[in-house]
Image (cartoon, rainbow, N blue to C red):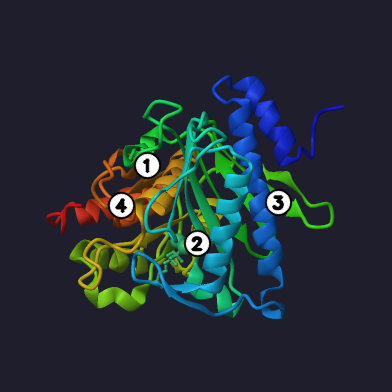
Amino acid sequence: MEKSNLTLGEFIIENQKHYKSTSGEFNRLLSSIKLAAKVVNYKVNKAGLVDILGDAGDTNVQGEDQQKLDVYANNVFMQTLINREIVCGIASEEEDDYVTIKGKHETNENKYVVLIDPLDGSSNIDVNVSVGTIFSIYRRVTPIGTPVEKVDFLQRGNQQVAAGYVVYGTSTMLVYTSGHGVNGFTLNPAIGSFYLSHPNMRFPEKGKIYSINEGNYVHFPQGVKDYLKYCQEEKEDRPYTSRYIGSLVSDFHRNMIKGGIYIYPTSSIGPKGKLRLLYECNPMAFLAEQANGKASDGYKRILDIKPTELHQRVPFFCGSKNMVEKAEEFMSKYPKDADY
Ligand SMILES: O=P(O)(O)OC[C@H]1O[C@](O)(COP(=O)(O)O)[C@@H](O)[C@@H]1O
Ligand SMILES: [Mg+2]
Ligand SMILES: [Mg+2]
C-alpha cells in the first residue's frame, strides 16, 4: 500500500530523508509554527464570541493601529517559539526591533532566526474575511552561541531556508517551501492535524486574475495604469477578472491555484509601496518562485534586494510568470520611481 494522507509532521520527516539539508532542529521549528497556527486558528474561528475583535488601542512601529488579533497572534507565535527554545532570534511586524532569544546559559546554540507577520490582512479581521500568518526562516550568519545581530535578519530573500503562510479561511491551510517545491496542508479540526491536501502547488503559467486596490488608481505609477488598461482591454483572452480580498495571503493563495497577479505598487501616497520586504514580500516571493511563479518590485527580483531596515517597504508584483513579465514590460517604459 502506497503512503497517502500524510500529516504535516510525517511529510516533514519524509522530506528530511530526501533532502539532507534539513535537520531535527528545522523539523522542531516547523512543528512549533504548526502548533502556534492551531492556537491562533482556534481563536480566529470563534472571533465574534471571544473578545478578540476590534482595535487593541495601540500602534506598531509602522504607525498602524494594532488589532487585538494582531497582538494575540504575535504573542502566541513569539511565546511558542521561545518556549520551544528552537530559534536564536525573532523579528515580527508587531515588534519594534528584533528579539534575541537567550538559551539556558545566556547563550543560544540554535542556528535559525524567524521573521513573521503574525496576522496578515488585519483590515479583514472584524468582517469575517480570511486572514493569515506569514513566516520566513534563515540560518544565522553570526557565530552560534553569540548574541544574534541585526545582520542575521537583513539577509537577501534568496538566502531563505524556508518560508510559508497559514490561511485562516473557509478551511485552515498551512503552505510552505523549504526549497523543494510548495506543498499545502489542510487542518482537520476534529483530529487537530494538518494533512497533505495540495501536493506540489504551482502557479498556472498563464493567469487571468489581477489583484490590486484600484481605489488608489489615481496615485499609481503610469506603468501600473497602462498594465491595468491592458488587463481590462477586450482583446485575445482579455479582459482579465479583478479579484481583491485585501489579505495578501488569501489573494496570493487564490492566484497560485487559479493563475493571477497581485500588485501593491508605489503610489504618490505610499512612495515605497505598503508591503514589508522581510516578512511579507520575501517569503511570498520564495513560495512564488518555488511554484513556477515570479516576484519583483516591477524592475528587480524581490529575492535579490539587499534589505537595509527591519520594517522596510517595497513595491510588490507577484504571481503567474506571464502576468508579472507583462507588468514589468509596462513598468520598464518609465524610470524607476524610488530606490529603497
Ligand atoms: O487595504 P489596502 O491598502 O489595499 O492593503 C491591503 C494589504 O495590506 C495588508 O493587509 C498588509 O498586511 P497586514 O495586515 O499584515 O498589515 C495585506 O495583507 C493586504 O494585501
Ligand atoms: Mg501583512
Ligand atoms: Mg500583519
Q: Which residue is mark 4?
A: 326
For residue 252, above or below residue 225:
above
Which badge, 4 or 3, comes first in the chain's sequence?
3
- Residue type, label 3: Thr
Query: Residue at left 37%, top 29%?
Result: 141
Report whether residue 245 is seen: no
* Mark 2–mark 1 distance (CA, rounded to whole Å): 26 Å
- Residue type, label 2: Asp
Q: Which residue is mark 3?
A: 186
Identify the element where label 2 is drawn. helix
Which badge, 2 or 3, comes first in the chain's sequence?
3
For residue 154, above or below residue 214:
above
* Mark 2–mark 4 distance (CA, rounded to whole Å): 19 Å
How many numbered marks does the figure carry?
4
Q: Nearer the viewer, mark 4 or mark 1?
A: 1
Q: Which mark is residue 153?
A: 1
Q: Are marks 2 and 1 in contact (CB under 8 Å)?
A: no
Q: Nearer the viewer, mark 3 or mark 1?
A: 1
Identify the element where label 3 is drawn. strand
Report whether residue 300 is seen: yes
The reply, left or right, for residue 26 in relation to residue 216 is right
Q: Are marks 2 and 4 in contact (CB under 8 Å)?
A: no
* Other residues around mark 3 within 10 Å, as few (<14) / some (14–19) / many (≥20): many
Q: Which residue is mark 2?
A: 251
| Image x and y of residue 5, in percent | 79, 40
- Residue type, label 4: Lys
Q: Nearer the viewer, mark 2 or mark 1?
A: 1
* Other residues around mark 4 within 10 Å, as few (<14) / some (14–19) / many (≥20): some
Identify the element where label 1 is drawn. loop
Q: Quadrant of residue 263?
A: bottom left
In-front residue for pair 17/102 = 102
